[in-house]
Image (tube, grey):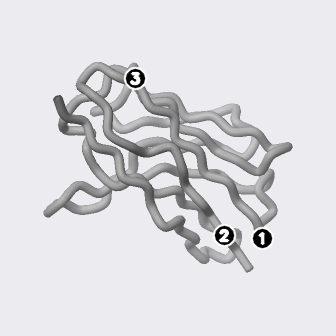
Amino acid sequence: QVQLVESGGGLVRPGGSLRLSCTTSGIVFSWLSMNWYRQAPGKERELVASITSGGGTTNYADSVKGRFTISRDNDKDTVYLQMNSLKPEDTAVYYCHTQNWVKIDYWGQGTQVTVSS
């Protein structure tokens, strides 16, 4: 059974930081690229950051470049999203995602991030 479990969300003030974690099981984690998406109320889900299987290549949405950092620990089957200089517009539910080699998508349950003073 495949499981992606996010944690680390919460309420933070503008300018603050949070670190999200996504712990996985049931997949060959070290073979797969991993992604973080987010969905704000009334908006479509958007890709925030991606990391290749070995961690050598990362990509970011323009809106988070320079503020967010995606990383992974293949020994722990976990992917992280370090979020700094948070803004109110970063408020969303953040989801961990991967797709296996037969194009099956796996999603976590999401973790709420709220940026507010």
Residue 42 x, y percent position in the rendering: 14, 63
The image quadrant that residue 97 belongs to is bottom right
Badge 1 crowding class, 10 Å Cα cut-off, few under 14, some 14 to 19, many 20 or more, is few
Q: Are marks 2 and 1 in contact (CB under 8 Å)?
A: yes
- The answer for how far apart the CA atoms under marks 2 and 1 are is 6 Å
Q: Which mark is residue 84?
A: 3
* Image location of residue 101, percent across then percent down: 70, 70
Query: Of label 2 and label 1, which has the lower sequence position?
Result: 2
Q: Residue at x 71, y 56 (%)?
A: 32
Locate residue 43: give its quadrant.
Answer: bottom left
Q: Which residue is mark 2?
A: 3
Q: Residue 18 sits in which quadrant?
A: top left
Q: Amino acid at mark 2?
A: Gln
Towards the viewer: 4 or 46: 4
* Residue 85 vertical placement versus 115 (above, below): above
Mark 1–mark 3 Cα distance, whole angstroms, equals 31 Å
Along the line of sight, the residue nearer the viewer: 49 or 92: 92
Mark 2: few/some/many CA within 10 Å (<14, 14-19, 20+):
some
Secondary structure at badge 2 equals strand
- The spot of residue 94 in percent (x, y) is 40, 52
Q: Secondary structure at mark 1?
A: loop
Q: Which secondary structure, mark 3? A: loop
In the image, what residue occupies the spot 75% across and 39% down?
A: 73
Residue drawn at 34 percent across, 45 percent down: 113
Q: CA distance from mark 2 to mark 3?
A: 27 Å
